[in-house]
Amino acid sequence: MDDVEPSRALAAALDEVRDIPGDTWTEGDLTELALRLDRVNALRQKLDEIKTWLELDLADRMEGEYAAIPGIGRLHRTEFTSSGWKYDGAGERLRDDLADAVSRDIALDIATGELDPMKRNVALAAVRAAYEAIPAFSSLKAAGNKRFGVRISDYRNYSKAYKVALEVGVTE
């Protein structure tokens, strides 16, 4: 496999698949079709992996926002912010901390400055019920920090990254 040139291999595979008529893909029994679907899924997964490698490498090699590619078009690199949980369980910790902060805010008796434990329990139950309806989130609005003292940056890491799009036929 050392003498295989990736561009030629991709072109040959694409030509071969394109030459198969559409109705041929659905001919056969249940097992044959399921096998084809399994192979399509595996091929798609591998192609997505290769696409990621190429996009990352292209973004690193590009000197500017655009690069002309003779015979194809141009590459367009854009920056975006990527984020992920800081540690396993950070999402759950965020939800617990936010539920606690919201329930304390709701239960605070403004006149006395004391927390009403019954109001706190009701508020905590309401927030947890909302979490069941809204199972996941990875950002907080300004009130998370300002009103409740919960900052998403305590739970998530952020980094700058690039994505690359191939604009076929664009020559400018």
Image: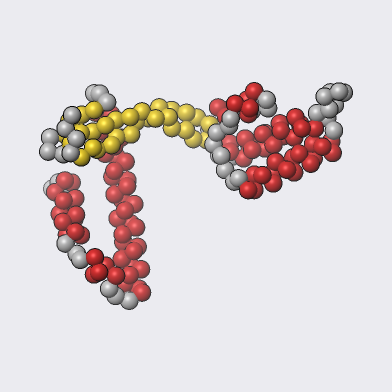
Left or right: 153 as drawn, with respect to 76:
right
Q: Position of residue 60 (x, y in %)?
A: 28, 29
Give coordinates of residue 73: x percent, y percent.
Answer: 18, 36
Residue sitting at x 28%, y 45%: 50
| Residue 87 is at least partly visible in this image | no
Q: Residue furthest bottom?
A: 29
Q: Is residue 117 left or right of residue 43?
A: right
Considering only vertical position in the picture, is 48 above or below 21? above
| Image quarter of the C terminus | top left
Residue at image location 70% in from the left, 41% down from the top: 127
Is residue 122 shown left or right of residue 146?
right
Does residue 58 appear to the left or right of 159 in the view shown?
Answer: left
Q: Position of residue 118 (x, y in %)?
A: 84, 39
Residue 77 seen from this side: yes
Q: Residue at x 87, y 23 (%)?
A: 112
Q: Between residues 134 and 160, which one lies in front from this camera angle?
A: 134
